[in-house]
Amino acid sequence: MSGNKLNLQARFEGYLWPDESAITTASLTLLKLLRVVYVSIMDLIAGQLSLRAMSLVYTTLLSIVPLLALSFSVLKAMGAHNEIEPFLFQFLAPLGEQGIGIGENIIGFIDNIKVGVLGSVGLGLLIYTVLSLVQKIENAFNMIWHVQTTRSIGERFSSYLSVILIGPVMMVSALGMTATVMNSSVVSYIMAIEPFGSMIILATKLVPYVMVMAVFTFIYMFVPNTKVRFGAAVSGAIVAGFLWQTSGVLFATFVVNSTKYTAIYSSFAVVIMLLIWLYISWLILLFGSNLAFYVQNPSSMRVSREGFEISNRVKERLALLLMQIIGTRHYQGGKPYTLDEVTEKTAVSHTVVRYVISKLESQHLLLESNDEPTGYLPAKSLDVLMLADVIQAVRSAEEKNFLSASAINLSDATLAVSNSIDDAVSAALSGQSVRDLVVDTIES
């Protein structure tokens, strides 16, 4: 049965990745769109996004009151704390009347938190709880974007806290400006004229969708510890925002018709519904970011998250190409290429490029710059970086941590064949440096 499933999947992928030489531009655009949708759904089925969403549900339950308490305290100082409550009730709206009760309880908890009497230790724990939530969110997004490094402690504190404190102020200001515009005499006059009146009414119904999509776009661009292009973030935000608003309507219908669950679980039913809604919300948010990743990195669509296999020949060719690209930029005195820039120039999967770069770094052939974002530099002078060392770096990359070639007992005849292969590679590249490769590339 599993074999038939794999064959069906392989056949379907064959339709999505055909020979592009005889395909029209319109058909290729449609294929690219279908590819993004397909790989995003496959990642969703794989379960990694679901696990992250469930983890965030647990963290959200622990952190939602401290998070809102900090936001409310800033807005209360501005006299606008009552304006943020509709956001909470809007999020809980799919839970129906039970959502109103949960929202009122949360606001009651927030009112009971007196920041002034918490003391330095209590205030520190409050801030730590909030920052831990945002850090776990960043880790989830970094997993989606294949980012292995997180922000430093200083960056987390300044960036996270600024969003937590300034974000609500900006949202309230945006709502206030929208309300002012809608209540202006000019808009009232235009609404009296058809078809402009109907168009404005339709626009007001679309405002919640636009607001959610704008927030999602900001999250997709800010949270991952990598550069996310605006177009990719918007693409993911449009899909995720539409799914979130639509799922809210469907979930509200489900809650209304879930009288059987209420009879079974009694007062626990509202807690279960809240957990389910939090899970759906996080899953949609992560799904949108996953889609944005593939829009920005289409070369990664055919690389499995569970792992990948590439031949030694591919490793060797990619290692030489990376040394040539990075060495050329260094030779010409340009700013070091970032991982995204190198990936774009190689037209190879983001994941595979990072894998080969890590092997070159481990053998001290490349090193990271101190720039933001991080770039890559030759670890030594191009004259002393030998091409034979580059090939050897990727051929023996895993031997130090896993299985060494010397640990395999070979007969004398087999060992002679193996050594002759190594000698042939060394002889073919004897005396050739990365500088020779760079100069030949520039002159050709």
Image: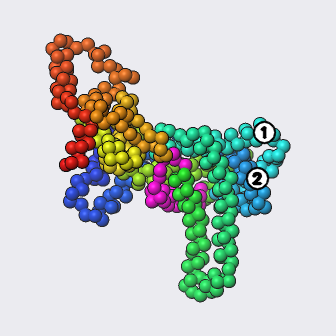
Assign a secondary structure to mark 1.
helix
Q: Which residue is mark 1?
A: 120
Position of residue 250 in the picture relative to residue 181 (left or right): left
Quadrant where the image shows the N terminus: top left
Residue located 71% across and 53% down the image: 71
Classify residue 30 as left or right of residue 40.
Answer: left
Q: Nearer the viewer, residue 310 or 315?
A: 315
Query: How many other residues sit within 10 Å of disc 1, few (<14), some (14-19) or many (≥20)?
Result: few
Amino acid type shown at disc 2:
Ser
Above or below 23: residue 325: above
Distance between the Cα atoms at labels 1 and 2? 16 Å
- Disc assigned to residue 73: 2
Q: Is residue 257 visible?
A: no
Viewer-closest of 138 and 198: 138
Q: Magenta residues?
A: 223-251
Specify few, some or many for label 2: CA neighbours under 10 Å numbering under 14, 14-19, or 20 or more. Answer: some
The question of residue 320 being in magenta is answered with no
Residue 282 visible in the shown view:
yes
